[in-house]
Amino acid sequence: MTCRFGFYAAHEQYDPTRLLDFAVKAERYGFDTVWSSDHFHPWAHTDANSGFAWIWLATAADRTQKVTLGTVTPTLLRYHPGVVAQAFATLNFMYPNRIFLCLATGEAMNEVPLGLPWPPYKERLARLEESLVIIKRLWMENFIDFEGKYYRLRKANLYTKPKTKIPLYVAANGPSAAYLAGKYADGLLTSGRVFDEKFKPELLPALERGARDAERDPSEIERIVHIITSYDEDYDKAVEGCKFWNATMVPGIFNAEVYDPRIIEEKAQSITKEEVIKKRFIVTSEEEAIKKIESYLKFGIREVEFLSTSPNQDKFIKFFGEKVFPYFRSTLRE
């Protein structure tokens, strides 16, 4: 058994140039993957950023040597799935075996600021399913016709196709999206925020049901967990480092038609320090980090991906690379 470790490049919290430096350093210290957020507006207003993920990915791939890179991208209204397929086919052509794509049902912050409607969840889920079909077909087939409820293709063809297989994942925090991951995707990405309550009783059965319905082996579908992490030797500093992401803990925020970062930030004021401690991965020692990661591995997780909101990103990268990853690489090889 092997386990990969991912670094999440948060365009919301850092400018693109700093994120490039973090990505290069993450590779140097043993991270296997670099994940990029893909939002139009960020999750906060104060000291926020909002770089464009696809441009950044190409530069990050050029600045690194071996890490695999990709985004969590919602294909709703601002992106037609055919354009997403083209973008990632091109990235793969230039950097074969180093590109992945994860699809999601999205947030209002990506659509409404552009004058687009915010669809209900049922429609977003249906769009996700059509997108999975379209993207897979465009990567493999020629001159495609597709007549879906939400998307259409007319003799669509990617003249620059991927050189190698692109892993296609689905982000799921509920059973409906997990079912689609089992039916269509190479992997399921879920959040550490819901993992303890939902993964075994809800997400895993839905994943397996989707795989069975598609006559696939569920054990071959990757299981990936995304956790918001803050490391510092000083516990209170580590807790304080999580503050930027408090909005993602507001009940119902992911489905709400809330898209102004100033309002999102106001809503985040309701999140208490106790809630942060309960939901976030606060780390002050390598023993804590190892214990937490081991708790995921027993559920068959094959990649732990860290959104570090640590007070010092460089210190976080070095700590995990030097103190935590070597333990797992030596243990899992035995």
Image: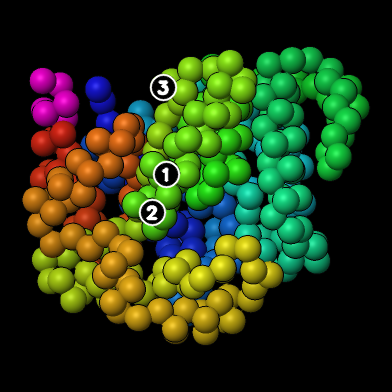
- Dot 3 or dot 1, earlier in sequence: 1
Tell me how the rendering is colored.
rainbow
- Residue drawn 18% across the image and 76% down it: 236
- Quadrant the C terminus occupies: top left
- Which amino acid type is marked by label 3? Ser
Residue that label 3 marks: 219
Residue that label 2 marks: 197
Q: State whether residue 64 is above or below residue 107.
A: above
- Residue drawn 59% across the image and 42% down it: 177
> Residue 63, image x and y in percent?
40, 39
309 or 175, which lies in front? 175
Residue that label 1 marks: 201
Asked if labels 2 and 1 touch by Cβ distance under 8 angstroms, the answer is: yes
Asked if labels 3 and 2 touch by Cβ distance under 8 angstroms, the answer is: no
Rounded to the nearest angstrom, the CA distance separating label 2 from label 3 is 21 Å
- Dot 2 or dot 3, earlier in sequence: 2
Left or right of 68 in this view: 87 = right
Q: Which residues are magenta?
A: 329-334
Would you call the spot at circle 3 few (<14 residues within 10 Å), some (14-19), or many (20 or more)?
few
- Which amino acid type is marked by label 1? Pro
Residue 233 found in image quarter = bottom left
Q: Secondary structure at mark 2?
A: helix
> Residue 147, image x and y in percent?
88, 30
Left or right of 169 in this view: 35 = left
